[in-house]
């Protein structure tokens, strides 16, 4: 059963969501099959609305969204029983001790009291708050509150973990620890992840597939795992005197070239081609290479590319 | 798994039935309530009148004690419908005070730091949530209204004998029904206030205001318009009207009983509308 459901983690079919008179999501269509999905987009792109819709909090005005094979609108309850949700904003009961709070949430998810107690302790120790578990959550630091939110999201053993800006407000070591934890959770079980973040690096470290939203529309769906497997190398060149023969010679070696204004050339190199061969061809053709940047395609490139192609080059995240 | 083994494990154990999960809220709320010494004192004080009522019933049915007290009049100790009306009025007022202390914190605590979102992101609906909170007040206020009233009824039936129970069995209906509407109205009002006002003292004030201000406005309306329909805004009086009719007593009130029922049901519906508007899972949509 689960194997069949897991074919698509998230399936969007002409999903349109209106809040008041405003259309927030405009006919999103796409299938995300990876276990770890990143959700990216500038402010107001509709990320939180999409998460709320997937959780069944908003009803689609048109189309549908399916998560783990379940319709978010018609099977909301069944779907939420498979989900652990870590919201972006503060979400805790300040006077309760950390472990009691997590136990409470686990019991609401359906765990019997003794199991909920055991799982709450496990989750608290697992996220690294073992020493602070008997303190009221209201006395926790911001980083500890984030970890407590993660603990309540995993205590009942969900099939899908939805993390909305999990590293918000964390200092670098705490951020690193949280990203490691998310990675560990992912590796330790068959749990799926949906991570919404402004930090491309967080998404790049934890996700296999990325859904980029812009103005309530899908700007791009990119399979990072495939990109990584393709292992493509890029050269960004700033040249003087480069003519068509230069790029055609590179292409004859198996490179893919994209020529931009002011002599900027982007070259995708196969593994068999070394950089010194590019220098040699440039020397033979009398081309001056004024700047060279050698790197692999990053999520930032993918994101910026998606923003450019949808006419939002100035969009900031 | 021992806690020292720091590793994430999926859960594959049994789950509690969906229908019973609302009671988790009730259980945790009671656990929090009983941590408060003031609440325990208030609860005990709410039950103190029951001891006096029970003592009265005992004396009323015990000629020896009456002789010892040198009571000559046979009509002094009568346990009839008037007496149970008095019990009900006293206990419903105690319930009102208890409700004013307990009600304001029930939802506000979950809304202050956004915990409501965590409840509703689980297989747990808003109806479950309201039911769980309603059960707290329902059980608590029942414990000081119809439950002790029925126990007193049973005590009187046991002591009086001579078929008293059969001639007075009809009183069970008004005891339960009048308590039910009062408890429901009080609970829904205080939950609606708790969902709207975060500070306990302010919320308690709002609950008092929601009873006394409409009553005052109603009286003003009566004075100005020379009518009696303004009494519809006096919820306590409407409840007493229902109570009096239930216990087959003359109320001296011109308002028809169905209108009184209508007002109390309307207040309940209005409170539900407020709860529906306030209890939302959504986060703020940016942009």
Image: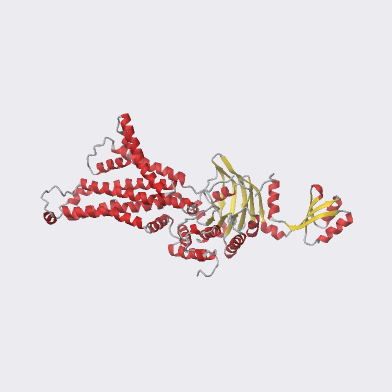
Q: Position of residue A224 (x, y in %)?
A: 67, 57
Q: Quadrant of residue A167?
A: bottom right
Quadrant housing the C terminus of chain B:
top right
Q: Taking B35 as reference, is B172 above or below it?
A: above
Relative placement, left or right, of A176 versus B282 is right
Q: Is the image coloured rainbow, by chain, by secondary structure, or in one colour?
A: secondary structure
Q: Position of residue A45 (x, y in %)?
A: 61, 46
Please name whichever residue, A14 or B29, is drawn nearer the observer in this view of the structure: B29
**Which residue reaches farthest top?**
B225
Q: Position of residue B53 (x, y in %)?
A: 22, 52
Relative placement, left or right, of A228 versus B97 is right
Please name whichever residue, A99 or B2, is drawn nearer the observer in this view of the structure: A99
Q: Taking B35 as reference, is B229 above or below it?
A: above
Q: Taking B207 as reference, is A131 above or below it?
A: below
Residue at the (58%, 65%) spot, across then down:
A188
Number of labels in the image equals 0
Please name whichever residue, B280 or B87, is drawn nearer the observer in this view of the structure: B87
Please name whichever residue, A211 or B117, is drawn nearer the observer in this view of the structure: B117
Can residue B191 be seen at all in this image of the molecule? no
Relative placement, left or right, of B123 versus B37 is right
Q: Position of residue A39 (x, y in %)?
A: 61, 52
Can residue A204 be seen at all in this image of the molecule? yes
Q: Quadrant of residue A210?
A: bottom right
């Amino acid at each position: 059963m689960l194997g069949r459901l897991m074919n698509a983690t998230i399936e969007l079919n002409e999903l349109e969501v209106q809040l008041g008179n405003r259309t927030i999501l405009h006919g999103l269509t796409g299938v995300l099959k990876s276990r770890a999905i990143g959700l990216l987009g500038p402010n107001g792109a509709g990320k939180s609305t999409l998460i709320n819709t997937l959780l069944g909090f908003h009803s689609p005005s048109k189309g549908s969204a399916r998560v783990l094979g379940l319709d978010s609108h018609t099977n909301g309850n069944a779907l939420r029983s498979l989900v652990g949700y870590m919201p972006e904003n503060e979400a805790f009961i300040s006077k309760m001790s950390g472990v009691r709070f997590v136990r409470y949430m686990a019991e609401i998810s359906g765990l019997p009291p003794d199991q909920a107690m055991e799982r709450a302790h496990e989750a608290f120790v697992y996220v690294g708050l073992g020493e602070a578990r008997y303190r009221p959550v209201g006395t926790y630091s911001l980083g500890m509150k984030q970890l407590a939110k993660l603990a309540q999201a995993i205590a009942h053993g969900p099939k899908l973990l939805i993390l909305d800006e999990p590293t918000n407000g964390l200092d670098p070591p705490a951020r690193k620890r949280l990203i490691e934890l998310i990675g560990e959770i992912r590796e330790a079980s068959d749990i799926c992840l949906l991570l919404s973040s402004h930090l491309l690096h967080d998404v790049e470290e934890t996700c296999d597939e990325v859904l980029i939203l812009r103005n309530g529309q899908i700007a791009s769906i990119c399979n990072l795992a495939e990109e990584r497997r393709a292992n493509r190398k890029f050269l960004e060149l700033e040249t003087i005197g480069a003519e068509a023969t230069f790029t055609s010679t590179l292409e004859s070696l198996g490179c893919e070239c994209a020529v931009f204004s002011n002599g900027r050339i982007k070259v995708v190199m196969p593994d068999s081609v070394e950089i010194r061969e590019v220098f040699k061809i440039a020397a033979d053709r009398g081309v001056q290479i004024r700047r060279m940047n050698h790197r692999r395609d990053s999520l930032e490139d993918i994101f910026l590319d998606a923003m450019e192609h949808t006419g939002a080059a100035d969009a900031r995240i | 798994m021992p806690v020292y083994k720091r590793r994430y494990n999926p859960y594959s154990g049994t789950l509690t039935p969906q229908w019973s999960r609302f009671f988790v809220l009730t259980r945790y709320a009671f656990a929090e309530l009983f941590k408060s010494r003031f609440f325990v004192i208030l609860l005990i004080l709410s039950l103190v009148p029951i001891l006096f009522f029970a003592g009265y019933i005992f004396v009323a049915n015990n000629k020896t004690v009456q002789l010892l007290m040198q009571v000559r009049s046979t009509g002094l100790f009568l346990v009839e419908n008037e007496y149970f009306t008095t019990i009900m009025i006293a206990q419903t007022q105690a319930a009102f005070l208890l409700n004013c202390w307990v009600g304001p914190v029930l939802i506000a605590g979950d809304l202050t730091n956004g915990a409501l979102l965590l409840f509703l992101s689980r297989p747990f609906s808003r109806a479950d949530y309201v039911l769980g909170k309603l059960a707290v007040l329902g059980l608590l206020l029942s414990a000081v209204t119809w439950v002790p009233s029925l126990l007193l009824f049973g005590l009187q039936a046991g002591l009086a004998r001579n078929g008293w129970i059969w001639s007075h069995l009809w009183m069970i209906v008004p005891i339960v029904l009048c308590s039910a509407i009062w408890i429901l109205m009080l609970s829904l009002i205080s939950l609606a206030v708790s969902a709207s006002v975060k500070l306990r003292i302010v919320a308690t004030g709002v609950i008092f205001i929601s009873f006394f201000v409409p009553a005052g406005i109603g009286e003003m309306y009566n004075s100005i318009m020379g009518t009696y329909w303004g009494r519809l805004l006096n919820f306590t009086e409407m409840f007493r009207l229902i109570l009096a009719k239930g216990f087959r007593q003359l109320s001296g009130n011109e308002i028809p009983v169905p209108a009184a029922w209508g007002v109390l049901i309307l207040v309940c519906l209005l409170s539900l509308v407020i709860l529906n508007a306030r209890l939302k899972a959504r986060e703020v949509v940016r942009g």
